[in-house]
Amino acid sequence: MKHWYKHNNQHYIVHRDILISSFTNKEGIINLEGVKLWRDGLPFVDHVLRTDTHFLFVETIQDAEVIEETQEMVEEVHS
């Protein structure tokens, strides 16, 4: 199930979370290539965040931008 996550005033949709231990070898070294493969293989995922226990494979929610032409069109319709 997807859920929202906020980090440093940026909002994300979490598409998948996987235990860090799933990417760690016996010596405790994290396989970052494996993390990148998961990131690149999941649709819409453009970023990976790390918590104490999980990697979060997320989609960045872009800020909305108001377009002046659209605003004028709405005003005309309501006139």
Image (spheres, grey):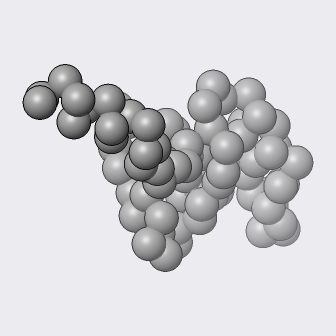
Is residue 8 shown above or below 31? below
Please indicate whether residue 73 sits to the left or right of residue 61 in the image: left
Please indicate whether residue 76 sits to the left or right of residue 7 in the image: left
Between residues 52 and 43, which one lies in front from this camera angle?
43
Q: x, y (%) of residue 6?
A: 40, 64
Tag count: 0
- Residue 4: in sight, yes or no? yes
Is residue 28 shown above or below 61? below
Q: Quadrant of the rendered structure where residue 38 is? A: top right
Which residue is at 33% across, 40% downward? 71
Q: x, y (%) of residue 56?
A: 55, 52
Please indicate whether residue 9 sits to the left or right of residue 59 in the image: left
Which residue is at 44% across, 72% downward? 9
Q: x, y (%) of residue 49?
A: 60, 60
Q: x, y (%) of residue 52?
A: 52, 72
Please indicate whether residue 21 sits to the left or right of residue 29 in the image: left
- Residue 18: in sight, yes or no? no
Which residue is at 59% across, 64% downward? 50
Residue lying furthest bottom in this view?
8
Looking at the figure, which quarter contains the N terminus?
A: top left
Between residues 17 and 9, which one lies in front from this camera angle?
9
Between residues 75 and 26, which one lies in front from this camera angle?
75
Which residue is at 11% across, 30% downward? 79
